[in-house]
Each structure stands twice: as C-alpha cells, then as structure tokens.
Image (cartoon, rainbow, N blue to C red):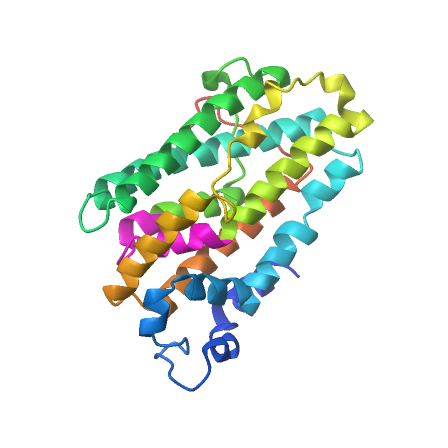
C-alpha cells in the first residue's frame, strides 16, 4: 500500500464500521457513536473503540508488521549511515516535540479542573527532553560528537509529518483530550519498536562492530508511558473523562488519531529510505 492509499484509508474508513462497537444507530454527523454517560464513567471504552478502528488497525499493521526499517535491521542490513539517519530523524522530531509539549503545558497545564492535565504534559515533556539528551549520547558513536554537529544534517521532511501533527494539535485542538487519547492509543507500538530495535542491535552480530554499550542504547528505554503504566493510564482516563464531559466528540478523537497515524507511517517509511541521512544544509533549522 502506497502513501496515497493509506491516507485515503485513514480519512475515509472506520467510523461507520466500528460504531457498532457500542450498538445502535446513535451516531454523530461523522458516523461515530454519540458520547454516552457510560463512556464518561468509563473512558477506556473510547480508547478501545479508537484502537479497534479499521483505520487504526491498518496503520498499526504498516507500523509494526510491515516496517521495512525494522525488517532490514533484523536482517543485518542496516548500515552505520542508515542508523545515523535514524538518529538524525529522531533528533529533529524530538526537538520539535519537546517544544510542542512545552506549548501544550502552557496552553492546557492548569491545575483546574483536573491536576492530571498539568502532570501529564509535565511528565511527557520530561520524558522527551531526557530522550533527546540520551539520543545525543548515542550520536557520538555515529560521528556526531554533539547536538550542533547532529543538526548539520537535514532530516527527511516526509518523516516530520508525525511531529507536525502534534504541533498542529497543540495549536488547534478544541480540547487537549484529543492529544492525550491519541497518545494512549499509539504509545504501546512505539515502545515495542524502540525495544525491538535495541534488542536487535544488542544481539545481531552484524552490529557488533558499532561497539554500542548499554549506556549508549539508553535512548531506547526512554519511552515507558504506555498501557502497562498505571499512572499514565490513570491520567489518560481522568483527562478524557473531563473532555467528554465538556462535549468533545468521538469524531474529534478519531480524526486526531488519524493524523497521528499518517505521521507515524510516513516516519517509518522515511527511515526505510536507504539514502538517509540526507546531506545538504550546514546550519540545521
């Protein structure tokens, strides 16, 4: 499936077919189920609805099962230059994400009506900022001794759509639960991929010559906010419950997730480009 087909799928498929999860014909103008008191009382129902959407499942298949970068890595085919491209792409994404999340904290981080909103974006900012620092350490093993040197390389702009979707959400979401719900749905897959990449580098003899230590690979352990994290899911449920009470629609949550998923697919497709890293500019942004 090419980029165009995936974008069409994510834009058009899912709402009507998955609305039956809640039964009946009580759907909004988009074809998604109308928010009920049961959803407000148990917002995990909405997370499960979003997860089971055909559009989300198709995206997950591309991201996890049909991931050419991971497949090449497991086959011992990733060169040092392509791994350098991964680091560069990750650095540009994280740099932008850290700034976007700081903006989300500024826009939405009030302690009222629920303190979990402030805590969520604070924890997310700290996680991503720490990941960026760890990534800089990893870059030293790939001829990038510091952050300034790392940003002398161009990212693949196709791979920046994911981080752009977060920035757009921070600027234009009606309610921050749109951001939080999407992250709750995609978090597990990203953590899985990061751990899989780390394990492959550690165990595949093709990468032994890179000489990477456990400290070098600490970057891949940065992303632990997922469905197994009770504190994370408690914040997600509290924030989502507040959003549903304030008349956020399931349609809004689904569309925000679609944007996130398109960005993820394009991100991994960009990393599958054997010509990464892209050489060109000498001054980063």
Q: Is residue 181 magenta?
A: yes
Q: Which residue is found at the position 44% from the left and 86% from the top?
A: 24
Place of residue 276 in the rendered image (x, y in percent of width and height, measured from the top left):
63, 34
* Image-based side of 233 in relation to 56, left or right: left
Q: Tell me where the magenta segment starts and ends, as one range.
A: 168-185
Q: Is residue 203 visible?
A: yes
Q: Is residue 278 visible?
A: no
Secondary structure that dominates the magenta span: helix
Decide: is 35 above or below 266. below
260 and 280: which is toward the camera: 260
> What residue occupies the far bottom of the structure in this picture?
25
Q: Quadrant of the N terminus?
A: bottom right
113 and 167: which is toward the camera: 113
* Image-based side of 138 in relation to 130, left or right: right
Q: Residue 26 falls in which quadrant of the image?
A: bottom left
Place of residue 264 in the rendered image (x, y in percent of width and height, measured from the top left):
53, 49
Place of residue 220 in the rendered image (x, y in percent of width and height, measured from the top left):
58, 31
Decide: is 3 above or below 199. below
Q: Which residue is found at the position 50% from the left and 49% from the top?
A: 227
Q: Quadrant of the C terminus?
A: top left
246 and 116: which is toward the camera: 116
99 and 175: which is toward the camera: 175
Place of residue 119 in the rendered image (x, y in percent of width and height, measured from the top left):
30, 39
Q: Which residue is found at the position 70% from the left and 46% from the top?
A: 68
Decide: is 93 above or below 44. above
Q: Which residue is found at the position 53% from the left and 28% from the top?
A: 280
């Amino acid at each position: 499936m090419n980029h165009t087909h995936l974008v069409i799928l994510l834009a058009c498929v899912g709402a009507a077919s998955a609305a039956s999860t809640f039964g009946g014909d009580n759907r909004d103008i988009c074809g998604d189920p109308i928010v009920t008191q049961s959803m407000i009382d148990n917002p995990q129902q909405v997370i499960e609805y979003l997860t089971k959407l055909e559009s989300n499942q198709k995206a997950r298949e591309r991201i996890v099962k049909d991931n050419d970068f991971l497949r090449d890595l497991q086959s011992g085919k990733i060169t040092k230059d392509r791994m350098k491209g991964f680091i560069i792409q990750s650095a540009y994404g994280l740099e932008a994400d850290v700034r976007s999340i700081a903006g989300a904290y500024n826009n939405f981080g009030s302690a009222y009506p629920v303190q979990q909103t402030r805590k969520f974006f604070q924890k997310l900012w700290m996680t991503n900022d720490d990941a960026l620092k760890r990534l800089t350490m990893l870059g030293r093993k790939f001829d990038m001794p510091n952050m300034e040197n790392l940003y002398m390389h161009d990212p693949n702009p196709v791979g920046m759509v994911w981080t752009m979707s977060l920035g757009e959400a921070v600027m234009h979401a009606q309610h921050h639960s749109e951001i939080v719900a999407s992250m709750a749905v995609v978090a597990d897959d990203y953590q899985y991929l990061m751990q899989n990449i780390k394990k492959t580098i550690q165990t595949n003899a093709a990468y032994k010559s890179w000489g990477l230590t456990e400290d070098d690979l600490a970057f891949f352990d940065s992303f632990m906010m997922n469905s197994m994290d009770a504190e994370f899911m408690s914040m997600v449920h509290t924030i989502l419950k507040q959003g549903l009470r304030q008349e956020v629609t399931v349609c809004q949550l689904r569309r925000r997730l679609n944007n996130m998923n398109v960005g993820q697919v394009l991100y991994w497709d960009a990393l599958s480009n054997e010509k990464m890293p892209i050489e060109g500019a000498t001054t980063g942004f």
